[in-house]
Image (cartoon, helix red, strand yellow):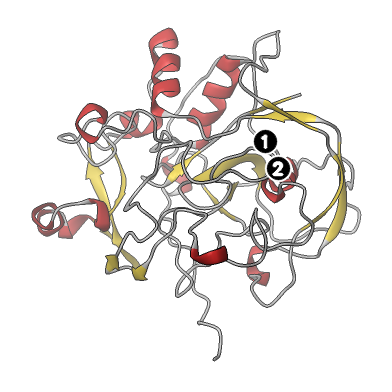
Amino acid sequence: MNPPEKKGCCTPSRPVSTSATTTYPSPTSTTNREGLIALPGGAFLMGSTGPEAWPADGEGPVREITLKPFWISPQAVTNEQFASFVKATAYVTEAERFGWSFVHHSQLSKREVSALMANRVAGLEWWYRVDGAQWRFPLGPDQDLDRLQRWSHPAVHVSWTDAAAYAAWAGQRLPTEAEWEFASRGGLSGKLYPWGDELTPGGKHRCNIWQGTFPKEDTGLDGYRGTAPARSMKPNDYGLYHMTGNVWEWMADWFSTTYPSSSPRIDPAGPPIGQNRVMKGGSYLCHISYCNRYRCAARTSNTPDTSTGHLGFRCVAD
C-alpha cells in the first residue's frame, strides 16, 4: 500500500504583524531543578531522512550532535503549575491580551460550531477563532478548568512568549530542539517514537493522537479525545511523559528548514534570528492520514505570539 499523501501542518498561526507587546521577567539568578530529571547528555543521532520524514520541514540531514548534561521536566507544564505562576506574577497571557485563541472543532459542541462558522480558519476549516478562549478557559468562556477537570492537563493557549515568561519565573528555560529530541528518544538511537518503531506495540497505545477519520471523528481509542493528563500513559526510558502526542511543545530555537554544514554540532541552539519558533512532538490531533509528526525527529513551527488548544511546553535547566 502506498503511504498517505503528506499534507501541511494542522496548526493555525496568528499573523506575524499582529504580535502583542509583552514583557516578561528576567531569569532568576538561581537555577531551579526541583522536580526535574537529570539527563547525561552525550552524542546522539538527530533528525530523519527516512520515508516517513518531511523534507520540507528540514528534518534532515541525520547528524551526530553532542550535548552537555541537563535537567528536564518529566511532563509538560500543567494548568496547576501555570496557575501558580500567574498568581505569583499577575501575568496576562497573549491569548488574554488578544481576547481570543484557536480551538479545534472536535472540542466544540455542534451548537458552538454552527455559531462560529464565520470564525473558521481559511484552509484549516477545522480550526475556529473562539473569543474568550485562553488557558483558564481552554474551550471558550463557558468551559473553565474546574468544569473540565483539567488542572492536571498541560496548559494550552500558551504562546512562546508566555512559555518563556513561565520558564524565567521558574528559574528554568525552554529546551533547545536538540535537547528535546535527545530527551524524547529515551536513550534509543534512530527510532521513530520514544519507545521504538512500532506505533502500538502489543496493541497498546503509547501516545495520545487521533484515531478515526481526520478531521471528522476521533474515536478516542487511546482513552482520550483532546488533551490527556500530563502524567498519563507510559513514560519513555528516561521517565518522560508524552514526548510525542498530547500537545505540541515550544522550543527555544528559531525555526529554519536548512541545516548548514557549518552549524554547531555541540550544544546547537538554532539560528540567531527568525520569524517562527520550533515546535516538537505532535498532539492529540495528529493522524497518519494528514500529519504524522508524532515522531521524535518531526518538527514544525509557529509565530511566537500564536496560541492554540493543542500547544504547550515543558522546561529544562542547566
Q: Residues within 10 Å of mark 1 (few under 14, many from 20)?
A: many
Q: Is residue 122 visible?
A: no
Q: Quadrant of the N terminus?
A: bottom right
Q: Is residue 247 visible?
A: yes
> Is 238 left, or right, of 87 in this rendering?
right
Q: Toward which corner of the image does residue 202 lie, by quadrant?
A: bottom right
Q: Where residue 229 sits in the image (x, y, percent)?
A: 41, 38
Q: Which residue is mark 2?
A: 183
Picture layout, residue 233 above or below residue 76: below
What label sits on residue 14 in the rendered view? none
Q: Are marks 2 and 1 in contact (CB under 8 Å)?
A: yes
What label sits on residue 175 in the rendered view? 1
Marked residue nearer the N-terminal end (2 or 1): 1
Front residue (pair 18, 86) = 86
Q: Where residue 86 sits in the image (x, y, percent)?
A: 40, 16
Picture layout, residue 164 above or below residue 51: above
**Amino acid at pointer 1:** Pro
Residue at 46% across, 41% down: 232
Q: Where residue 106 sits in the image (x, y, percent)?
A: 26, 57
Picture layout, residue 86 above or below residue 281: above
Q: Residues within 10 Å of mark 2 (few under 14, many from 20)?
A: many
Q: Residue furthest bottom?
A: 1
Residue at 44% across, 10% down: 89
Residue at disc 1, secondary structure: loop
Residue at disc 2, secondary structure: helix
Q: Residue furthest front?
A: 202
Front residue (pair 184, 264) = 184
> Is 113 left, or right, of 306 in this rendering?
left
> Is 230 left, or right, of 235 in this rendering?
left
| Label 2 to label 1: alpha-carbon separation | 10 Å
